[in-house]
Image (spheres, rainbow, N blue to C red):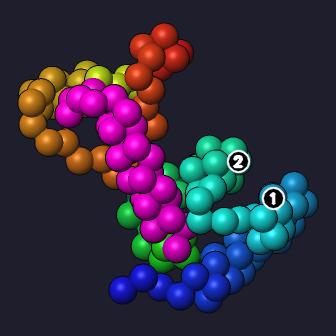
Amino acid sequence: MKPAPDRTKKELLDFLRTTYRDKDEQLRIIDEFDHNYSMDRAVWWYTKYTLFYSFLNQALRNHDFDVLTAFRFFIIDLYEQLSREHQKYLAALNKSNIRVYRGQAINENELELINDSIGECISMNSFLSTTTTRETAVF
């Protein structure tokens, strides 16, 4: 069952305003989000301001369920928009497999785990941004 969007959006806004109560720039972004957010622009909001990206990914990495609960409507919108975009991309590509790239510093143990998982499913505890262009992923 999908949560009621108005109530859960208000809960997120209250949470963010409390968290950033002394930070004018962050409060300006939160107000902009309050007035201009729509579910079909969740990815835009996630990538536009580090406030959303960094806060949400940190909560995912740290298993911070209070923050994840506050972001629940946004996570659902983000997932649904990404799913729709993925389906459109696959339909236009007319292939079942695609190669994507991600530039990220990792230690040798993590690299070994990934190499050992080639051809297998792997699980991430954050959203994983990728590109189909290798040059874009290299930093």
Residue at x 27% of width, y 30% of height = 94
Q: Is residue 91 left or right of residue 121?
A: right
Mark 2 crowdedness (10 Å alpha carbons): few <14, some 14-19, many ≥20: few
Q: Is residue 109 left or right of residue 85?
A: left
Query: Which amino acid type is shown beneath numbered disc 1?
Result: Ile
The image quarter in which residue 52 lies = bottom right
Are the residues at dot 2 and dot 1 in contact (C-beta closer than 8 Å)?
A: yes
Secondary structure of the residue carrying numbered label 2: loop
* 26 is within the stretch colored magenta: no
Secondary structure of the residue carrying numbered label 1: helix
Judging by the rendered image, the residue that carries numbered circle 1 is 29
Rendered location of residue 25, percent (x, y): 87, 55
Mark 1 crowdedness (10 Å alpha carbons): few <14, some 14-19, many ≥20: some
Which sits earlier in the primary sequence, circle 2 or circle 1? Answer: 1
Rendered location of residue 46, percent (x, y): 60, 51
Front-most of 39 and 94? 94
The alpha-carbon separation of the residues under discs 2 and 1 comes to 8 Å
Residue at x 42% of width, y 14% of height = 134
Residue 30 visible, this angle: no
Instruction: Give the magenta-colored segment's residue range.
Output: 73-98
Image mark for residue 49: 2
Q: Main secondary structure of the magenta part?
A: helix
